[in-house]
Amino acid sequence: MYIKTKDIYAEYRRQKFSNKYKAEHETALNNRKAAKAYFDSLGLEKLPTMNMLRQEYAALSTEKKALYAARNAKKTYMLEVLTAQQNVQRLLGYKDSEQAQTRAHDR
């Protein structure tokens, strides 16, 4: 919104802050003022360009893909470990005796 109203604000300044021009473009000028206040509250000295934002987005997207790949690998490993644990418990009869103990305890 801030960039879109840049030309309107420049013309408003060229017309020496004309009340007539301000009345015609009041919404755009108010939107620009609100956007400027927001950016000032963030402490930004210079607004990023679209190319800078695209580059940052591409870098973050690449990082996200890498993190998801690592997450999926760890999730697969966790499932393998849980499957192995369940197999060991079944082979040793651990699960059956544990269930019997909880049933006896509940009675």
Image (cartoon, helix red, strand yellow):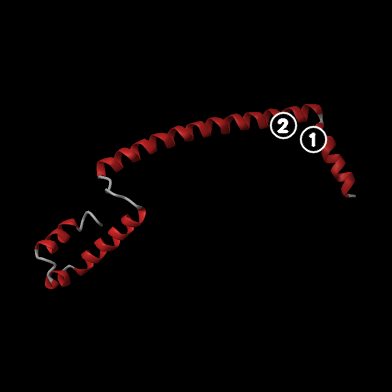
Q: Of the numbered discs in the image, which one, if any, rests on residue 86?
A: 2
N-term mark: 1 or 2: 2
- Residue at the left extreme? 15
SS of the residue at dot 1?
helix
In the picture, residue 39 is in which quadrant?
bottom left
Q: Position of residue 64 (x, y in %)?
A: 43, 37
**Residue 52 placement, left or right of 81:** left
Q: Residue at x 87, y 49 (%)?
A: 106
Taking depth in this image into account, of 73 and 42 the one nearest to the observer is 42
For the point 22% across and 54% down, the residue is 3
Report which quarter residue 95 is drawn in: top right
- x 62%, y 32%: residue: 79
Q: Is residue 42 above or below residue 90?
A: below
Between residue 81 and residue 3, name the one nearer to us: 3
Up the image or down, 1 lies above or below 83; here it is below
Res. 84 mark: none
Asked if residue 107 lies left or right of residue 50, the reply is right
Q: Quadrant of residue 19?
A: bottom left
Instruction: Please name whichever residue, 59 or 12, is drawn nearer the observer in this view of the structure.
Output: 12
Position of residue 10 measured from the top left corner of the image (x, y, whole percent): 14, 58
Percent position of residue 1, x then y: 25, 57
Mark 1 near mark 2, Cβ–Cβ under 8 Å?
yes
Q: Amino acid type of disc 2?
A: Gln
79 on left or right of 38 = right
Helix or strand or loop: what does disc 2 sit on? helix
- Does residue 66 appear to the left or right of 48 in the view shown? right
The crowd level at tag 1 (other Cα within 10 Å; few <14, some 14-19, many 20+) is: some
What residue is disc 1 on? 95
Question: Image point 15% across, 57% down: which residue?
Answer: 7
Q: Amino acid at mark 1?
A: Lys
Q: Position of residue 75 (x, y in %)?
A: 57, 34
Q: CA distance from mark 1 to mark 2?
A: 8 Å
